[in-house]
Every structure is written in C-alpha cells, then in structure tokens.
Image (spheres, rainbow, N blue to C red):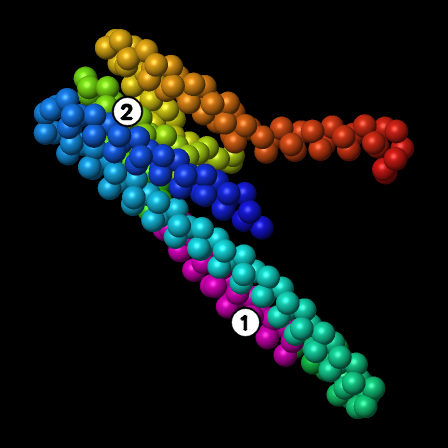
C-alpha cells in the first residue's frame, strides 16, 4: 500500500537534486564567462524552487507512510475488537439465554414500531453525515481544480528565454512539475491538463534550443519528451486496458467452461 507512490516521490527527489546540481554547474560557467547578473538570479530562483519541491516530496512521503501505518493499525484494532465482541456474545448467549442474548432476540410484533422509529431517525442522521461529507469533498475538489488552473495559466505565460542556461532552468521546472503530478486515469482532467501544458512548454524549449544551435541540450529535452509521452499513454489508459483485458480473459474462461 502506497509503495508505488513513495517510490515515484523518491525518484522525483533524486531528479530535483540533479536539477540543483546542473543549475549550480551552469551558474559556475556563467560566472567564469562573466555573464549578465540576471542569469545568476534566475539560477538561484530555480534552486530555491527545486528545494521547495524536495520539501513537498518529503512531506508527501511522510504522509503516505503515516497513512500506511494507520491503515495497518486500524486493521489490527478492528480484528481485536471483532474478536472480543464475538467472544463476549458467545459467553452472554450461553449464560443468559435468549432473554439477554446478543443480538437480542425479541418479539418483532411487539417492538416493530419502536424499531422502525429508531431506524428512520438513524437513516436521517446517516444521510446528514453523508451529505456533509459530500459537501466537504466537493469544496476540496473545487479548491484543487482552481489551484491547478492557476498553475496552468502561470506555465502558459512563461516566455522561453534566449539563453541556453535559462532555457534549461525552464526545462527542469517543467520536468519537476510533470514528475510530481503526472497523468491520471478517470476524472482528473485538471491534473492531466496541467501536465499537458508543461509538456507543450518543454516542446517549445526544445525548438528554441535548436534555433540557437544548442543541439545536444535540444536532443536531451526531446528524449525526455518522448519518455513522458509514453508515460502519459500508460498512466491515462492503463487502467482501462487492464479492465478490458480482465473482461476478455473472463469471457474466454467462461467459453471454455472453466468459470461459470
């Protein structure tokens, strides 16, 4: 549970660390070449951003590990409670008989009215709880969509620089965004749309690098783009392919009489 998510985040941390290292090397070359000061400022901003990403990744890893720990603990506690509850029922039924049995055995005709009243009240309360939970979930989902829409607009407004080092800063930023969010199957279009915009910005960076004759860096960016496009297909459609495959296997097995 959460193993894949933790591994992906750890991989993202390593990518951000590599981006920081590459940016520092670029800044050192810029200082040696006495490049304009704003190149150094751009590099510093990218390093700070990558450090913030690493902190976010680590927090998410800790959160996943805590969820995993709580999930295991709840399973054990539930088992203990169920074991104790069922043991208590058995003892109660053996000692006190039907009059005090658990579940309590009663005359349905005599207590039907009270039971219906209790059930109606319970259903109303449960309905209110579910409505409140749905309302909170809808509000949270709306906030998340608005956040990704805002981030998407920020990416769209980024102007590709003319300097190779600054272009690579944008490349590292886009790669970090995509590796953090990726693409999702199902109703996650706001995330998919954001990652698509980042991928488009990477393609623009590759074109700009070619235009200023930075061939090797352009080839690196294009290689990353091809990897991400394959990853997008897998992440967006693997779930549906898996379901279709499972249905197909079930159909074949039923035709062969293995399952009915």
Disc 2 target residue: 168
In front of the other: 136 or 258: 258
Q: Is 181 left or right of 206, judged from the image as shown? A: right
Characterize the local packing of mark 1: few (<14), some (14-19) or many (20 or more) Cα atoms within 10 angstroms. Answer: few
- Residue 83 position by quadrant: bottom right
In front of the other: 175 or 154: 175
The answer to whether mark 1 and mark 2 are in CB contact below 8 A is no
From this view, report whether residue 103 is shown above or below residue 20: below
Label 2 secondary element? helix
From this view, report whether residue 54 is shown above or below residue 254: below
Q: Residue furthest right?
A: 257
Which residue sits at x=63%, y=79%? 114
Look at the image and give the residue range highlighted in magenta: 114-142
In front of the other: 35 or 260: 35
Residue 186 coordinates in the image, percent (x, y): 51, 36
Q: Is 180 left or right of 250, judged from the image as shown? A: left
Disc 1 target residue: 121
Would you say residue 126 sits in the magenta stretch?
Answer: yes
In front of the other: 25 or 17: 25
Give the position of the C terminus as an image quadrant: top right
Characterize the local packing of mark 2: few (<14), some (14-19) or many (20 or more) Cα atoms within 10 angstroms. Answer: many
Residue 148 coordinates in the image, percent (x, y): 33, 38
Label 1 secondary element? helix
> Does residue 151 show up?
yes
């Amino acid at each position: 549970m959460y193993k894949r998510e933790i591994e992906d985040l750890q991989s993202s941390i390593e990518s951000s660390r590599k981006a920081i290292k590459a940016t520092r090397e670029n800044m050192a070359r810029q200082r040696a070449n006495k490049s304009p000061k704003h190149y150094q400022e751009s590099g510093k901003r990218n390093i700070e951003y990558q450090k913030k990403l690493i902190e976010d990744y680590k927090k998410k890893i800790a959160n996943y590990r805590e969820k995993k720990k709580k999930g295991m603990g709840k399973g054990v506690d539930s088992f203990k409670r169920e074991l104790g509850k069922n043991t208590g029922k058995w003892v109660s039924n053996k000692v006190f008989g039907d009059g005090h049995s658990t579940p309590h055995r009663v005359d349905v005709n005599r207590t039907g009215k009270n039971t219906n009243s209790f059930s109606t009240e319970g259903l109303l309360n449960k309905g209110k709880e579910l409505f409140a939970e749905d309302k909170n979930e809808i509000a949270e989902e709306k906030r998340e969509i608005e956040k990704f829409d805002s981030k998407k607009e920020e990416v769209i407004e980024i102007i590709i620089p003319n300097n190779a080092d600054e272009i690579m800063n944008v490349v590292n930023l886009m790669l970090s965004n995509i590796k953090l969010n990726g693409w999702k199957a199902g109703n996650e279009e706001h995330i998919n749309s954001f990652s698509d915009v980042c991928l488009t910005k990477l393609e623009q960076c590759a074109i700009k690098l070619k235009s200023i004759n930075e061939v090797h860096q352009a080839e690196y960016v294009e290689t990353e783009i091809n990897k991400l496009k394959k990853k997008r297909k897998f992440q967006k459609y693997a779930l549906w392919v898996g379901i279709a495959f499972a249905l197909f296997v079930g159909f074949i097995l039923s035709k062969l009489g293995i399952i009915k």
